[in-house]
Image: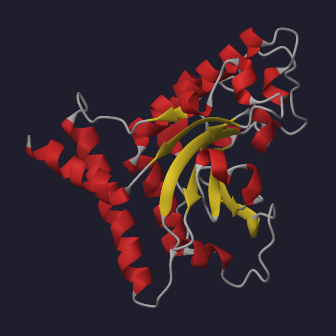
Amino acid sequence: MPLDDMNISVADLKLEPATLDGLSRAHLETMAEAGNRVLECYRVLKKSDANIVGEVLKDQGEFFEWDHYPSGDVYDWDSHSQYYYHAHPPENRAHKFGEEHGHFHTFLRPRGMPGGIKPAPVADYVKPTDANDALTHFVGLSMDRAGFPVRLFTTNRWVTGEVWYTADDVISMVDRFDIDQALPSWPVNVWVTNMLKLFRPDIEISLRKRDEIVARWEQANPGKNAFEDRELELTSFMDISVEARVKAVEKALKA
């Protein structure tokens, strides 16, 4: 059943970038530093005609849709943060949500979560055999063919096989995402970590929209498991610009 048949349109999923009004100076300074680190990754990679996507695919062989890159994902054993890059067949999404080469998915596993955080009390929750498998997904980062980010998005539960946590709980964990290691690519690890800091306010409103859309979907179709409904894939998306955000943060710090 198409989105529009559920009284939810693609336009309902699209968000505007967050304003920086009301953010503390400390928060703005964290975002400014994150922006500088993202731009530094671009500067260094450009010296060898490389980019973020090229780095994550380097030495990985032929690129196949759906496969995770790098093979086995990237996992930080101190923070228990995780990410991977992959691509979907473009014909199913590009005309609705915008073109992309592929996207990063970002996660945190329970061993990196604050004490007291528990999965949301959804009806079909099944406790994983391995407690550390009850991971949460933060956002996806869509990349263009030049290797730069163009969009961030949230997903329904079935998309990533995550365990569902409320938006408030997921938001409380975003700052714990940290890939602090050299392999498989230092610039990509630095970039992913700092993208979540630079767009932290946008991630917050995106996750709240995620919960709103799933709740609306449940209400529109009682008796159906919204979390596993293949007709509901993305739950929010937002066009982003690193350069525009860096300028906005600089302006806010001068105000």
Tell me: 49 left or right of 54.
left
The colour mode here is: secondary structure
Which residue ends up furthest to the left in the rendered image? 255
Dividing the picture into quadrants, the one containing residue 220 is: top right
Residue 46 in the image: x percent, y percent?
A: 41, 84
Tell me: 150 left or right of 160.
left
Location of the N terminus (image quadrant): top right
For the point 86% across and 39% down, the residue is: 130
For the point 72% across and 62% down, the residue is: 86
For the point 19% across and 38% down, the residue is: 25
Tell me: 226 left or right of 84.
right
Residue 43 in the image: x percent, y percent?
A: 35, 78
Residue 27 in the image: x percent, y percent?
A: 28, 39
Location of the C terminus (image quadrant): top left
For the point 73% across and 37% down, the residue is: 233
Tell me: 201 left or right of 55.
left
Asked whether 100 or 48 is in front, the reply is: 100
Dividing the picture into quadrants, the one containing residue 34 is: bottom left
Dividing the picture into quadrants, the one containing residue 69 is: bottom right
Residue 240 in the image: x percent, y percent?
A: 42, 50
